[in-house]
Amino acid sequence: MKSSIKKMVGIWARFYHRIRSSRAIRWTINRQARMLFNQEKTNLSSKEFQIVRELKKNGIAVVHISDLFPQTMFEELQQYVKNRWEHPEVIKKFKSRHEAVSGGKLLSKEYFLVNLWEGESVLNLANPFIRFSLDSSVLRIVNSYLSLLSKFRGWHLQITVPMPKGDRRYGSQEWHRDPEDKKLIKMFLYLNDVDEGAGPFVYLKGSQEGGKWRHLFPQNPPRGSAGNDIAIPQEDLVQCTGKIGTVIFCDTSGLHRGGYATSGNRFMYTSVYTTPASVWPIIFKYPPHLESINLSNQASYAVLNNPLQREPRFYKF
């Protein structure tokens, strides 16, 4: 009886998400966000315009943080990372993860990713990384690519742990499409130099919505999808090695992988932005009285989206 009920719930959930992620339903849900974006009449700088143009063409754009932000902002971000990296708790965790990976105890992707964030994921606007994620320049780029006012879903500040030489890829180290939305943006910031041995982000140009490789390993809402090396067209791969301060804007509903470090660590911050039609919940907590904080219209819309943190029904099945 229980197995039959579970099977019926699974069938209903798949049907629900198939309808929920259809073009017509997404268009309807995102209607207000499009209207508000059009009313904003966003003016892009020449650099922002170039980034948006590359995103629409390839699904990815790579710049340096100095192209968009003052040096003081980057220095503040670096200082936060330095303080966290030197914290005894982080040092202990990194050593234990490194020993686990080296000993072949790779049980999940948590073993090759160490969290650098201090405490819970709270939307604290005093934190330099939160201010970076909600900066007007970032939101202008994200919203112009999505052609609507986006929702800020969350962030990660992590270090990758080098894998034993010759070990297999695992989880996000393999080719995949992210599940959060049919069209979304993740912004990555390298906080150290990332070469081929430090697990650079790799992307298949043209695998975003509307791209020529969109048909490869299509998403299965509310899940993403997994790909393989054999079917990935090598001529359109972008391997994002880069100096400290490299910023990657990317539609990760497209095919990508990364984090397979073999000889060095990768320090990286990630911000996640989706359309309002995403069924995925936010992954942070709100501080008291956030509504009273002075935010830009685009930032306010991005974060004041789900104060009760209700998870949608049939989110998992």
Image (cartoon, helix red, strand yellow):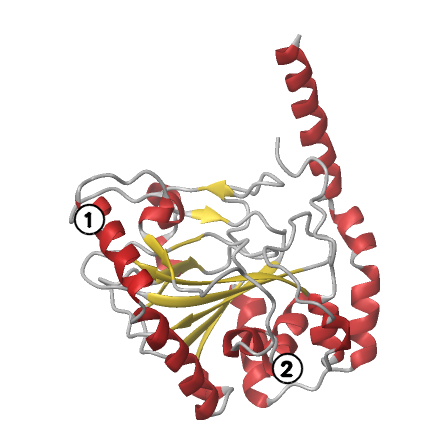
Evaluate whether residue 148 shows in this view: no
Q: Amino acid at mark 1?
A: Glu
Measured along the vertical axis of the image, is residue 226 above or below residue 79?
A: above
Q: Residues within 10 Å of mark 2 (few under 14, many from 20)?
A: some
**Residue 184 is drawn in which quadrant?**
bottom right
Point out the image quarter for the C terminus: top right
- Residue 28 lies, in percent from the top left, at 83, 53
Q: Residues within 10 Å of mark 1 (few under 14, many from 20)?
A: some
Measured along the vertical axis of the image, is residue 264 above or below residue 125?
A: above
Describe residue 143's horizontal placement relative to residue 27 as left or right: left
Q: Secondary structure at mark 2?
A: helix
Instruction: Give the residue displayed 69% in from the left and 18% down from the top.
Output: 8
Measured along the vertical axis of the image, is residue 13 above or below residue 301?
A: above
Point out the image quarter for the N terminus: top right
Q: Amino acid at mark 2?
A: Ser
- Residue 306 lies, in percent from the top left, at 73, 57
**Residue 300 is drawn in which quadrant?**
bottom right
Q: Are marks 1 and 2 in contact (CB under 8 Å)?
A: no
Front position among marks 1 and 2: 1
State the residue position of label 2: 136
State the residue position of label 1: 99
Describe residue 14's horizontal placement relative to residue 191 as left or right: right
Instruction: Give the residue displayed 44% in from the left and 84% down from the top.
Output: 76
Q: Secondary structure at mark 1?
A: helix
**Residue 289 is drawn in which quadrant?**
bottom right
The residues bearing labels 1 and 2 have C-alpha atoms spaced at a distance of 41 Å
